[in-house]
């Protein structure tokens, strides 16, 4: 086991204060071996443009012994489980976190929120990001 952090925002999500380089330096200092940048999905008010997520593909996988996962904190948009991540964005990302944010999908009652979350899971968005097995093996090998 080693320490990881799978939910971090950069200055691209305008409420955050750190850059990718800042996180790499801090991870090295704290002994974190792997982290994921998961900026807010583009439907959020403070979010980066969808090109930010597509362009993550140019980021190195490993810097000074610290693994970097490319991710998004996608917004659940409605009760049907749609999220604000699609198309080429999936091809560039390793990790998709889906959640509720009031500016995108206002809070509802427990049953409605549960139904929206289940619909999101049922859509199985993660399957659309991974590509074929060869692609997965190449991604996995980049961290070894």
Image (cartoon, rainbow, N blue to C red):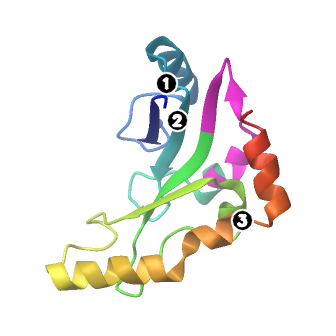
Q: Is residue 54 magenta?
A: yes
Disc nearer the start of the sequence (2/3): 2
The residue shown at (71%, 35%) is 143
Q: Is residue 128 magenta?
A: no
Q: Say if residue 9 shows up in the picture.
A: no
Number of other residues with Cα within 10 Å of mark 1, as a class: few under 14, some 14 to 19, many 20 or more: some
Q: Which of pointers 2 and 3 indicates the residue nearer the eye?
A: 2
- Foreground residue among 16 and 127: 127
Q: Using residue 11 as the reference point, say whether residue 71 is left or right of it.
A: right
Disc nearer the start of the sequence (1/3): 1
The residue shown at (50%, 21%) is 27
Disc 3 target residue: 88
Disc 2 target residue: 35
The residue shown at (45%, 76%) is 121
Q: Say if residue 138 shows up in the picture.
A: yes
- Foreground residue among 45 and 144: 144
Number of other residues with Cα within 10 Å of mark 3, as a class: few under 14, some 14 to 19, many 20 or more: some
Number of other residues with Cα within 10 Å of mark 2, as a class: few under 14, some 14 to 19, many 20 or more: many
Q: Which SS class for mark 3?
A: helix
- Foreground residue among 131 and 17: 131
Which stretch did the figure color magenta? 53-68
């Amino acid at each position: 086991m080693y320490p990881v952090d799978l939910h971090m925002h950069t200055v691209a999500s305008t409420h955050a204060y750190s850059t990718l380089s800042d996180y790499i330096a801090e991870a090295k200092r704290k002994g974190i071996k792997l982290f994921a940048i998961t900026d807010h999905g583009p439907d959020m008010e403070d979010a980066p443009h969808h090109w930010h997520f597509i362009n993550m593909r140019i980021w190195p996988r490993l810097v000074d012994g610290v693994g970097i996962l490319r991710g998004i904190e996608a917004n659940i948009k409605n009760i049907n489980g749609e999220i604000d991540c699609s198309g080429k964005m999936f091809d560039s990302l390793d990790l998709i976190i889906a959640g509720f944010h009031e500016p995108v999908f206002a809070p509802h009652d427990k049953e409605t929120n549960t139904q929206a979350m289940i619909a999101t899971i049922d859509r199985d968005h993660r399957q659309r990001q991974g590509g074929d097995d060869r692609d997965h093996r190449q991604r996995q090998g980049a961290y070894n």
